[in-house]
């Protein structure tokens, strides 16, 4: 019988619990209230280094080579779940019910939103992305390992990343680079490239993927507030241009996706 997700929830806040904002504390309290029989593990920067050193010393150097802090936390969430099994939850994720029903799967990811990435749409005929703000897997799950390997590949092989970044204006590269080298874009690319693992990953699609009200939900189990505390801050003009560009592009991609219908499936 295939291993299933254990009753464990993992949270990360690099600066430590003492420096955690109230929203993050509320997120943890919410998860504990709804899952009282789960084990909860918390990692800060010091714990992350110790965990990697004790369990995967070969990852210590790559961990320190990631150019952005969020990539370090992305990478670690995959490594921790790979080793321990359980659920990883961002600290701006709020649950509405227990995760008990998801324990029957070996690996589960959320639908995040319709993708604006040209490479995923044109090359793989995939118009959606899965999120890494909330996911669960059994320990040593092969898909999680594939995600870890692709994070390392993106770090050592810039040419492998280029197709994902090709249609992104250069002024916005610093914003999108983490998405496509360790974040949702990379996880989605791993999923569509590893068709051999398709039956091992459950994706929680909403009834209507084209309705933005259904984006950033962990299925029927929770909502991601998408606070983006990781975002690399640019100047005000650049941020405004980014919002305008993404708003225009999303309107365009939603129209394209509506032609494919409102439902999606993976397995």
Image (cartoon, rainbow, N blue to C red):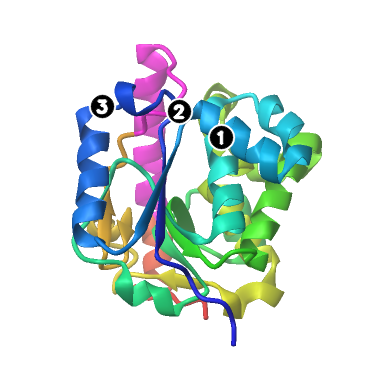
Q: Which residue is mark 2?
A: 14
Per the rendered image, the range of residues in magenta is 228-253
Q: Quadrant of the N terminus?
A: bottom right
Q: Quadrant of residue 76?
A: top right
Determine whether the residue tagged by mark 1 lies in a helix, strand or loop: helix
**Which residue lies at the image location 78% right of the left edge and 39% below the top edge?**
58
Nearer the observer, 79 or 215: 79
The answer to which of marks 1 and 2 sits earlier in the sequence is 2
**Element under label 3?**
loop
Q: How many marks?
A: 3
Mark 2 or mark 3: name the one nearer the start of the chain. 2
Q: Quadrant of residue 258?
A: bottom left
From the image, tell me which residue sits under label 1. 48
Q: Residues within 10 Å of mark 2 (few under 14, many from 20)?
A: some
Residue 80, position in %: x, y? Answer: 56, 49
Name the secondary structure under disc 2.
Answer: loop
Q: Say whether marks 1 and 2 touch (CB < 8 Å).
A: yes
Q: In screen coordinates, is 101 left or right of 128?
A: left
Distance Cα–Cα, label 2 vs label 3: 12 Å
Q: Which residue is mark 3?
A: 21
Prevalent SS, magenta region? helix
Neighbor class of circle 3 (other Cα within 10 Å; few <14, some 14-19, many 20+) is few
Label 1 – label 3 distance at C-alpha: 20 Å
Q: Nearer the viewer, mark 1 or mark 3?
A: 1
Residue at horizontal 62%, vertical 59%? Answer: 144
Farthest residue toward the bottom? 1
Task: Please tell me whether residue 248 belongs to the stretch shown in magenta.
Answer: yes
């Amino acid at each position: 019988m295939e291993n299933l997700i254990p009753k464990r929830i993992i949270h990360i806040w690099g600066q430590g619990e003492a420096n955690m904002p109230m929203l993050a504390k509320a997120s943890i309290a919410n998860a504990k209230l709804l899952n009282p029989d789960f084990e909860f593990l918390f990692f800060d920067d010091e714990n992350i280094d110790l965990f990697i050193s004790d369990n995967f010393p070969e990852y210590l150097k790559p961990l320190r080579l990631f150019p952005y802090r969020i990539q370090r936390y992305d990478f670690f969430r995959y490594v921790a779940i790979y080793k321990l099994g359980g659920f990883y939850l961002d600290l701006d994720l709020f649950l509405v019910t227990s995760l008990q029903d998801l324990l029957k799967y070996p690996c589960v990811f959320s639908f995040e939103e319709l993708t604006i990435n040209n490479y995923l749409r044109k090359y793989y005929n995939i118009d959606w992305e899965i999120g890494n703000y909330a996911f669960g897997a059994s320990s040593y799950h092969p898909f999680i390992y594939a995600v870890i390997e692709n994070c390392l590949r993106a770090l050592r092989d810039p040419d492998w990343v280029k197709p994902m970044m090709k249609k992104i204006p250069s002024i916005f590269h610093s914003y999108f680079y983490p998405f496509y080298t360790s974040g949702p874009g990379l996880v989605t690319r791993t999923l569509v490239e590893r068709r051999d693992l398709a039956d091992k990953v459950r994706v929680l699609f909403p009834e209507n993927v084209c309705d933005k009200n259904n984006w950033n939900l962990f299925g029927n189990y929770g909502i991601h507030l998408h606070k983006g505390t990781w975002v690399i801050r640019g100047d005000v003009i650049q941020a405004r241009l980014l919002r305008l560009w993404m708003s225009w592009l999303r309107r365009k991609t939603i129209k394209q996706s509506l032609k494919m219908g409102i439902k999606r499936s993976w397995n």
